[in-house]
Image (tube, rainbow, N blue to C red):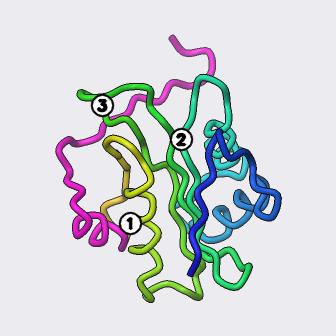
Amino acid sequence: MNYKIINRSTGEDRQFSNVRITAFLHEHLDEFGDSPEDILAAINYVFREGRGGRVVLAIDKDELVGAVVLNDTGMSGYIPENILVYIAIHRERRGMGLGKGLMLQAIENTPGGIALHVEPDNPAVHLYRKLGFTNKYLEMRLTKTAGAR
């Protein structure tokens, strides 16, 4: 298994373009995914001036088998420096330790703390706990509709 780290200093990967990574994530995030537009926006955030983060890819014989997208928050201390926005493993490769390997690469190659949001029924919650993630807070959101104040 090879891992590739992509960030603003390395630039978009020619073999695994942002669009190709988006399609992979959209296909393999299953019920935990978002629209292709939202996924692409998170990937593009990595390369924007004044933003940042990294994309970590798991590649087996030139096939994309896993991907992680981390965005810089621009904060530290009270908010971790990074947020793990997406992680997916090819559905035919799950249960083989690829998720753990990909997460370890992401953690090793990401300076500062990492926050993530995970649905309570997502099987990955067990992996995150094993890697040292804790649930310090209960997340609450207020979603405003267009035109609402």
Name the residue beneath numbered marker 3: 79
Q: Nearer the viewer, residue 59 or 66?
A: 59
The amino acid type found where label 3 is placed reads Ile
Residue shown at 48% from the left, 35% from the top: 72
x, y percent for residue 149: 50, 11
Q: Taking 34 as reference, is 1 above or below it?
A: below
Say which mark, if any, is on residue 91: none
Mark before the other along the chain sequence, 3 or 1: 3
Element marked by disc 1: helix
CB under 8 Å between discs 3 and 1: no
Mark before the other along the chain sequence, 2 or 1: 2
Check if residue 127 falls in the magenta segment: yes
Q: How many marks?
A: 3
Q: Taking 70 as reference, is 127 above or below it?
A: below
Residue shown at 82% from the left, 58% from the top: 14
Taking the image as shown, residue 106 lies to the left or right of residue 18, namely left
Name the residue beneath numbered marker 2: 53
Element marked by disc 2: strand
Residue shown at 71% from the left, 60% from the top: 21
The amino acid type found where label 2 is placed reads Gly
Name the residue beneath numbered marker 1: 104
Question: What's the distance in space between the residues labelled 3 and 1, CA to CA?
Answer: 21 Å
Which residues lie in the magenta part? 123-149
Taking the image as shown, residue 110 lies to the left or right of residue 29, namely left
Mark closer to the observer (3, 1): 1
